[in-house]
């Protein structure tokens, strides 16, 4: 019952977002504006304030990060090399791979980490910036590599993506403030926390609205397999690594929330912009969103305090 009480509000808000989109209240331009507000203001404020005030020390963050990076990297490698064996065409290889490993960290994992009981916020936030870097860098690499465009262009895009990402910048500055022992003035901190609290409901509403506009088309077998990699294989690999590294239940909760999240919706936009298989990307997002709800429910049932 506790897990139901925790999950029900999340999925009810997502369903509300879908209903509002259908009713015209969350039309495309409105959702785009809210996403921009979250990306540039709400989520960075939430990350920074959580880092500088998060309970718990930095102990154990290294093992947690290693398990998270390892689970993500192993999934990406298996999808990249296994894709052709499953029938993925050469130019769709990057699309399949990034759909198989790229978690929706900003709009699903982060709000959950900030709201689920038992999450060690300090450790969770310390792993966030490196994971965003890995997700973005590898997604760009596989999409370009499948089109034989690896080179200087790739590194420029990755570099620009890092320096322009406000969530990564908030993670870095928040970490620096935490390590230096600096706490913002009460008025500033309260402002940041208030801005951060808007992130969860708005992000969930936007996810519901976005799912109503993502087209499901083309071959469904390969997107279903990619979604299985994302919401089943990735958390299983992460769980195995977490056990090997001796993670406790609280750290395992952070690890599995991040790895069980569905494929990032923004991956569909990136694939479209970079000439990948748009139909495969969109369908993977939808299938992974459905499967991710089940995976996250299992994780929260087993590990949430």
Image: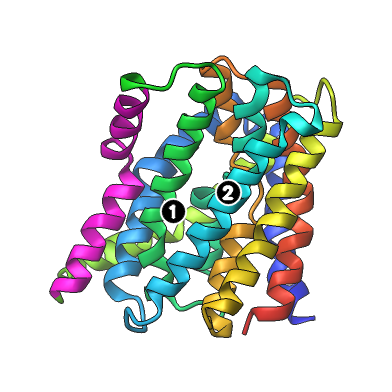
Location of residue 278 in the rendering, given as x and y in whole percent from the top left corner: 67, 20
Looking at the image, which residue is at 59% across and 44% down?
77
Instruction: Give the left or right position of residue 17, taking residue 250 as reference.
Output: right
Depicted 23 relative to depicted 117: above or below: above
Classed neighbour count for the residue bearing mark 1: other residues with Cα under 10 Å, few (<14), some (14–19), many (≥20):
many
The answer to whether the residue labelled 1 contacts the one labelled 2, judged by CB atoms less than 8 Å apart, is yes
Looking at the image, which residue is at 64% across and 71% down?
240
Q: Main secondary structure of the magenta part?
A: helix
In the rendered image, is residue 202 in sight?
no
Which of disc 2 and disc 1 is earlier in sequence? 2
Residue nearer the viewer, 259 or 96: 96
Instruction: Give the left or right position of residue 83, taking residue 113 as reference.
Output: right
Residue nearer the viewer, 36 or 63: 63
Asked which colour scheme the image uses, the reply is rainbow
Write down the region rendered in magenta: 154-180
Whether residue 250 appears in magenta in the rendering, the answer is no
CA separation in Å, label 1 and label 2: 9 Å
Location of residue 110 in the rendering, given as x and y in whole percent from the top left corner: 49, 58
Total label count? Answer: 2
Residue nearer the viewer, 206 or 120: 120
Identify the residue position indicated by label 2 in the image: 103
Classed neighbour count for the residue bearing mark 2: other residues with Cα under 10 Å, few (<14), some (14–19), many (≥20):
many
Looking at the image, which residue is at 56% across and 63% down?
112
Depicted 14 relative to depicted 256: above or below: above
Looking at the image, which residue is at 38% across and 59% down?
46
Location of residue 87 in the rendering, given as x and y in whole percent from the top left corner: 80, 27
Look at the numbered disc 2 and give the secondary structure of its residue.
loop
Whether residue 179 appears in magenta in the rendering, the answer is yes
**Res. 293 image quadrant:** bottom right
Identify the residue position indicated by label 1 in the image: 131
**Res. 122 image quadrant:** bottom left
Instruction: Give the left or right position of residue 26, taking residue 105 as reference.
Output: right
């Amino acid at each position: 019952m506790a897990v139901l009480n925790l999950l029900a509000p999340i999925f009810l808000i997502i369903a509300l977002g879908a209903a509002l989109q259908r009713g015209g209240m969350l039309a495309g331009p409105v959702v785009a504006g809210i996403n921009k507000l979250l990306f540039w203001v709400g989520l960075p404020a939430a990350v920074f304030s959580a880092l500088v005030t998060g309970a718990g020390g930095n102990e154990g963050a290294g093992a947690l990060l290693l398990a998270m990076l390892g689970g993500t990297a192993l999934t990406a490698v298996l999808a990249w090399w296994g894709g052709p064996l499953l029938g993925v065409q050469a130019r769709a290889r990057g699309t399949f791979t990034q759909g198989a490993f790229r978690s929706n960290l900003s709009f699903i994992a982060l709000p959950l980490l900030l709201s689920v009981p038992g999450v060690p916020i300090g450790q969770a936030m310390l792993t966030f910036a490196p994971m965003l870097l890995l997700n973005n860098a590898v997604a760009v690499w596989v999409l370009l590599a499948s089109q034989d465009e690896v080179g200087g262009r790739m590194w420029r895009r990755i570099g620009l993506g890092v320096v322009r990402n406000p969530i990564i910048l908030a993670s870095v500055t928040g970490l620096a403030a935490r390590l230096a022992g600096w706490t913002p003035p009460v008025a500033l901190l309260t402002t940041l926390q208030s801005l951060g609290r808007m992130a969860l409901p708005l992000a969930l509403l936007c996810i519901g609205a976005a799912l109503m506009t993502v087209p499901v088309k083309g071959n469904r077998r390969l997107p279903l397999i990619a979604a299985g990699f994302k919401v089943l294989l990735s958390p299983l690999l992460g769980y195995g690594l977490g056990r090997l590294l001796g993670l406790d239940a609280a750290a395992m909760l952070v690890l599995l929330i991040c790895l069980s999240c569905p494929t990032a919706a923004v991956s569909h936009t990136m694939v479209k912009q970079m000439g990948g298989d748009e139909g495969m990307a969109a369908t993977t997002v939808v299938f992974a969103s459905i499967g991710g709800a089940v995976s996250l429910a299992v994780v929260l049932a087993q590990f949430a305090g």
